[in-house]
Image (tube, rainbow, N blue to C red):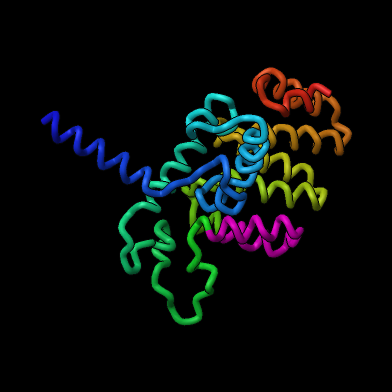
Amino acid sequence: MKNLITILITLFFVSICSFALDVNTASIEELLDANIDLLDAMKILEYRKEHKINNLDELVENNILTHDSLRRIKKTIERKNRPSKKDFRIKTPQTGLNARSSGQSDQTQLSDSEMFRKIMSFMEDKEYEKAAKYIKLFSKTYPGSIYLDDIIYFAASILEENQSYDRAISTYRKIVEKFYRSDITVIALYRMAICYERMEDKNDAISMYNRITDEFASSPWSEKARK
């Protein structure tokens, strides 16, 4: 029995290590390809300027990644090491949109990570109308995706950009309520405070800033909120 357990553990680590992601030298594109979102990738690039990263767990210990982010990356590494197989990847597993029907949009053939990248690209280029269409489709197609907190954040950002501050605050609040452990939660709180300021609601703005300094004291956003 012990020998069997040893073999299984060895096989597990061999499969994990066969896809090598060197976070000390990886480009931003390689980090994104490993399911590291843009915010986390930027944190890693900044951290490694002064530190050598010995393992991914070190990034969690130093508050660069959250446990959820680390789990997401490890799942990606595991997936990349699976044996290749024709049509192995299910492009739309949560809605059964795998088969293309006549007149069906190419949008439904995108995986959640592909659609997330497309939305992020639209957001970076400030093509908010296109981003909004894909955000709506993403929410319907992948309601349980690991990218959902980021998608909700993008939706709130578009509302804020359009000066729909009440709706933006309501949307940012969904992140806080549903994804409190997400690394984007503190940013959502900060944006809520900004929206309140722009609505000249100083009391609620101060309340949000205080919440950040109280609940996220170790975050860089705490100092921003304090100022």
Q: Looking at the picture, how far across and down is residue 3, in whole percent?
A: 13, 32
Q: Residue at x 51, y 28 (%)?
A: 58
| Quarter location, residue 44 | top right
Residue furthest to the left? 1
Q: Nearer the viewer, residue 215 or 95?
A: 215
Q: Quadrant of the C terminus?
A: top right
Q: Looking at the picture, how far across and down is residue 154, in whole percent?
A: 67, 49
Q: Looking at the picture, how far across and down is residue 176, in whole percent?
A: 61, 33
**Range of magenta residues:** 114-137
Q: Residue at x 54, y 48 (%)?
A: 147
Q: Taking 61 as reference, is 4 above or below it?
A: below
Q: Nearer the viewer, residue 179 or 55?
A: 55
Residue furthest to the right? 200
Counting the numbered discs, the total is 0
Q: Looking at the picture, how far across and down is residue 85, in whole percent?
A: 31, 64
Can residue 160 be seen by looking at this rendering?
A: yes
Q: Taking 155 as reference, is 104 above or below it?
A: below
Q: Residue at x 39, y 72 (%)?
A: 99
Residue 22 on the magenta segment: no
Can residue 177 be seen by looking at this rendering?
A: no
Q: Residue at x 38, y 62 (%)?
A: 90
Q: Quadrant of the N terminus?
A: top left
